[in-house]
Amino acid sequence: MATIVESAYVRQAGTVQQDMSWVVAVRGCTRFDIRVRHKEINATHFGDQTDVPGDTRITGGDECSYTPAQYILPLKTENLPLGCSTLPRFAARQIRVDDHDPRRGVYGKVPIPEGGNMYFKPREEAREKEFDRELSILNDIKKKCLAKGEIKLPDLQGIVVSGDVEETCIGMLMNVIPTSSFGIDLTRPECWAQGELHKKWEQQVIATVEVLHTHDIIWGDVNAGNIVIDEALNAWVIDFGGRNNPEFVDDDKAETIEGDWQGVERLFYVWLPNRRADIPW
Ligand SMILES: Nc1ncnc2c1ncn2[C@@H]1O[C@H](COP(=O)(O)OP(=O)(O)OP(=O)(O)O)[C@@H](O)[C@H]1O
Ligand SMILES: [Mg+2]
């Protein structure tokens, strides 16, 4: 079996056959699918030398490890959701996700060439409908200036584009929510323990959902992970990918106004109080 000799790479799969070898390797968030036809390298510099400094070397091995890989599914920018084609563009080559959690994929805070940071969300394969829904809704929220005062919603900054000949969109950028020191979202026990703030968060979320509904926007995926608590202890409604988490919103109410209210009610009247009771005081 083939292996790539460089510790930054993790081999996912590979095999050596009579006339061809292939290996799938992952480095950070990038997946490499390398196929080598033996007759094409036999007479080359690469085939002659077994250890070229700074080069990739293929040697024998027999172990294979597994690392989850996420695949980005680019969308031709000519096919962007309605109204999104005028969004500011950021070149993918200038964006580098440094602090991402490899189990979650290439999400996270990225430094921007113009200075400061933004939050990157990729257009992932199998989640492309969710991405397109969210892009379209965040664009709507921005155009209608819905995020003000107590209404905390992500501020879409633009799309990340790739390709010189045919431009594609590989992700979006929004503002980074400056998260509280005790926990990012309502899935965190540190947030459950802040019982005196639960009423305020509930009221902020209700006010936000009311504004959204007034503008014909449905939140959709109401759940504890989609309420972020910022450093000023305000609750933000995030994640407009839609669908539903049946613990909060019944399947037959997915992506409806009724479903949003069902989710909010279950979250603040059942889910959160139950967890709060578990906290040792
Ligand atoms: N703008 C942001 N600033 C800071 N943190 C963020 C931001 N957006 C999302 N996050 C963090 O990332 C987590 C996941 O974000 P989000 O729900 O938008 O992604 P997702 O792909 O839909 O994930 P999931 O499938 O878990 O719902 C949030 O719970 C929050 O902790
Ligand atoms: Mg989410």
Image (cartoon, rainbow, N blue to C red):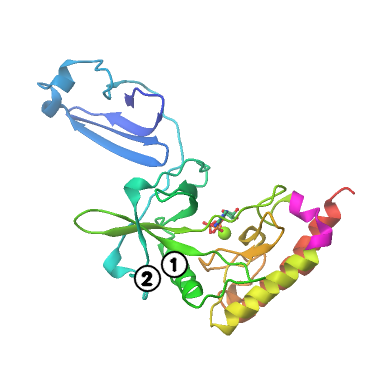
Looking at this view, name the residue that lies furthest to the left.
43
Marks 2/1 in contact by CB < 8 Å: the verdict is: yes
Where the N terminus falls, by quadrant?
Answer: top left
Is residue 188 positioned above or below 21 on the image? Answer: below
Image location (x, y in percent) of residue 48: 15, 16
> What secondary structure is marked by label 2?
loop
The Cα–Cα distance between marks 2 and 1, rounded to whole angstroms, is: 8 Å
Crowding at label 1, few (<14), some or many (≥20) Cα neighbours within 10 Å? many
- Count of labels shown? 2
N-terminal of the pair, mark 2 or mark 1, is 2
Q: Residue, x 42% and y 37% (percent of image)?
A: 28
Q: Nearer the viewer, residue 11 or 146?
A: 146
The three-letter amino acid code for the residue at tag 2 is: Cys
Crowding at label 2, few (<14), some or many (≥20) Cα neighbours within 10 Å? many
Q: Which residues are magenta?
A: 190-197
Q: Which residue is mark 2?
A: 84
Q: Which residue is mark 1?
A: 135
Q: Is residue 36 magenta?
A: no
Residue 24 placement: quadrant = top left
